[in-house]
Amino acid sequence: QPQLVESGGGLVQPGGSLRLSCAASGFTLEDYAVGWFRQAPGKEREGVSCINNSGGSTNYADSVKGRFTIFRDNVKNTVYLQMNSLKPEDTAVYYCARYRGRSYCDLMSRGHDYWGQGTQVTVSS
């Protein structure tokens, strides 16, 4: 059974950094693109960033461009999201999800078939 497990969330001050990890098991991660999503209380889930299977193609939401970086280590079956210059509005539960494709990725939720349980990120002073 495919499984994704996020980790690395926590409480950080504005301007700080966190690195989220998405560890995959039960399937070969290098065969799939992966997306990171987030959902804040009272808001709809939004796509944050995604990466294709090789890591050669990435995409970012406008709200995180220049601050977040997605990358992957297919040997470790893990996708990462490096988050710098964090803002209070980045506070949300962050999820990773497997995309039903490999050579390109998508920031829309549709097309993602397996999701992790989420990790809380709180940006506050």
Image (cartoon, rainbow, N blue to C red):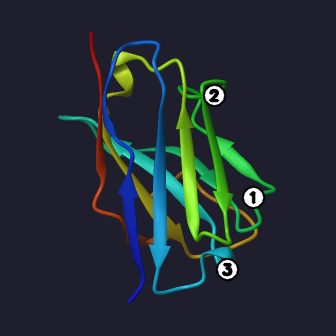
The quarter of the displayed image where residue 66 is located: top right
| C-alpha span from label 3 to label 2 | 26 Å
Q: Residue at x 46, y 46 (%)?
A: 20
Residue closest to the far left: 42
Q: In this view, does 3 lie to the left or right of 103?
A: left
Residue under pointer 2: 65
- Callout 2, which amino acid? Lys
Disc on the earlier residue, 3 or 2: 3
Q: How crowded is mark 1: few (under 14 residues within 10 Å), some or many (20 or more)?
A: many
The quarter of the displayed image where residue 113 is located: bottom left
Q: Which residue is drawn at 52% across and 18% down?
A: 85
Residue under pointer 1: 55
Q: As rendered, which of 17 and 68 lies closer to the eye?
A: 17
In the rendering, at what x and y percent does residue 16 appear? 45, 18
Q: Residues within 10 Å of mark 2 (few under 14, many from 20)?
A: few
Q: Is mark 3 on a helix, strand or loop?
A: helix
| C-alpha span from label 3 to label 1 | 11 Å
Residue under pointer 3: 31
Tell me if I can see residue 110 in this picture: no
Q: How crowded is mark 3: few (under 14 residues within 10 Å), some or many (20 or more)?
A: some
